[in-house]
Image (cartoon, grey):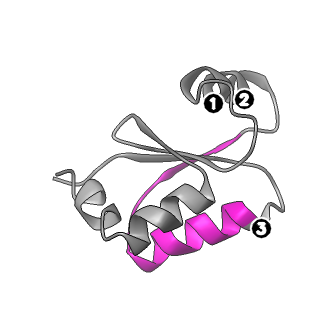
């Protein structure tokens, strides 16, 4: 089983690029949503407890946080099991 990954981003965001690069390096498919405004931004705010920074990342519906949080999971060896759906 492979996890479902969603990432809310904005154009020209270096932290978004960094998070996507990590996911890309692992061959992870993800759905990218533009959080500049509209329904996607509203969805991000509701699901991330009002966090307004990007990226906001969700794995199997679980809010992981932003780029630094994703990198911390990777450093701790916890990201791969999450991405595998375990």
Say which element carries label 3.
helix
User: Is 60 included in the stretch rendered in magenta?
Assistant: no
Counting from the top left corner in percent of width and height, residue 14 is at 77, 67
Residue at left 71%, top 48%? 54
Measured in 3D between alpha carbons, the distance from the residue under mark 2 to the one under mark 3, in whole angstroms, is 18 Å
Please name the residue that numbered disc 1 is placed on.
44
- Whether pointer 1 and pointer 3 mark residues with C-beta atoms closer than 8 Å, the reply is no
Say which element carries label 1.
helix
Say which element carries label 2.
helix
User: Is 24 included in the stretch rendered in magenta?
Assistant: yes
Please name the residue that numbered disc 3 is placed on.
14
Q: In this view, does 25 lie to the left or right of 77?
A: right
Residue range of the region highlighted in magenta in the rendering:
15-34
Residue at left 53%, top 56%? 69
Please name the residue that numbered disc 2 is placed on.
41
Measured in 3D between alpha carbons, the distance from the residue under mark 2 to the one under mark 1, in whole angstroms, is 5 Å
| Mark 2: few/some/many CA within 10 Å (<14, 14-19, 20+) | some
Counting from the top left corner in percent of width and height, residue 28 is at 39, 65
């Amino acid at each position: 089983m492979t996890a479902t990954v969603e990432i809310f981003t904005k154009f020209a965001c270096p932290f978004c690029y960094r998070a996507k690069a990590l996911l890309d390096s692992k061959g992870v498919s993800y759905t990218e949503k533009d959080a500049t405004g509209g329904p996607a931004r509203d969805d991000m705010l509701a699901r991330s407890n009002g966090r307004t920074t990007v990226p906001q990342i969700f794995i199997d519906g679980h809010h992981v946080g932003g780029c630094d949080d994703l990198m911390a999971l990777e450093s701790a060896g916890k990201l791969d099991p999450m991405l595998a759906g375990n």
